[in-house]
Image: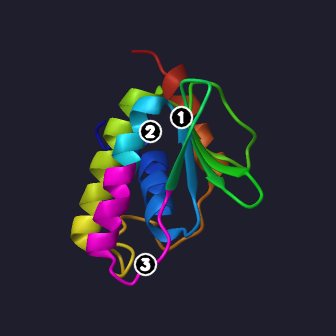
Amino acid sequence: MRITDPRWPAAREFSRMLLRTDELTIVGPKWLREHIERLAVRLGDVQPSRTSFPTFTPGEVDEIRVCIPISLKTMAICSTTEPPIDVLWLSMGSKEAWQCINSITNDLLDAGYPGCLGCGGPHSEEPWNEMNSRIAIKNSSNEAP
């Protein structure tokens, strides 16, 4: 994915969420388990003070969900089906989405995120605006080629 893709900001926010939020469960296709386990090991190496790591739960559909385990509230989803507005949405299939998220997550870890100021990219210190993200995505898909 190029940074000019309107989904790029959502992919970056998804990655930032994985890196800065404790107690996450990632629900997805079975092939994703080994990737989440590798991510947890990398997080432990790069963020030695971190004590909780994302866990994996196999899902029934081809999507990736980031949930808070206590409430099972979905915080983010990679899916071709649009979720409620209070959920960060990366409108992609699971394999394409994971390739993008994994790449961005590793780039952010290499830059020192979340322990650095500004290395999370543009607007990383501001609250996420899901409405603006979806408007940008919809506007780009309505433009003529």
> Is 111 placed above or below 9 here?
below
Q: Are marks 3 and 1 in contact (CB under 8 Å)?
A: no
Which label sits in the foreground, 3 or 2? Answer: 3
Residue 51 inside the magenta-drawn segment: yes
Distance from Cα at disc 3 to Cα at disc 1: 34 Å
Q: Amino acid at mark 3?
A: Arg
Task: Pick the quarter of the image with the C terminus.
Answer: top left
* Badge 1: residue crowd in 10 Å (few <14, some 14–19, many ≥20): some
Q: Are marks 2 and 1 in contact (CB under 8 Å)?
A: yes
**Badge 3 is on which residue?**
50
Q: Amino acid at mark 1?
A: Ile
Badge 1 marks a residue whose secondary structure is helix
Work out whether mark 2 precedes mark 1 in sequence or the reverse, and give the earlier one. 2
Residue 89 is at least partly visible in this image: no
For residue 6, which numbered disc appears in the image?
2
Q: Amino acid at mark 2?
A: Pro
Counting from the top left corner in percent of width and height, residue 21 is at 54, 68
Work out whether mark 3 precedes mark 1 in sequence or the reverse, and give the earlier one. 3
> Is 10 placed above or below 120 here?
above
**Badge 1 is on which residue?**
137
Relative placement, left or right, of 100 versus 107 is right
Counting from the top left corner in percent of width and height, residue 50 is at 43, 78
Q: Residue at x 45, y 50 (%)?
A: 9
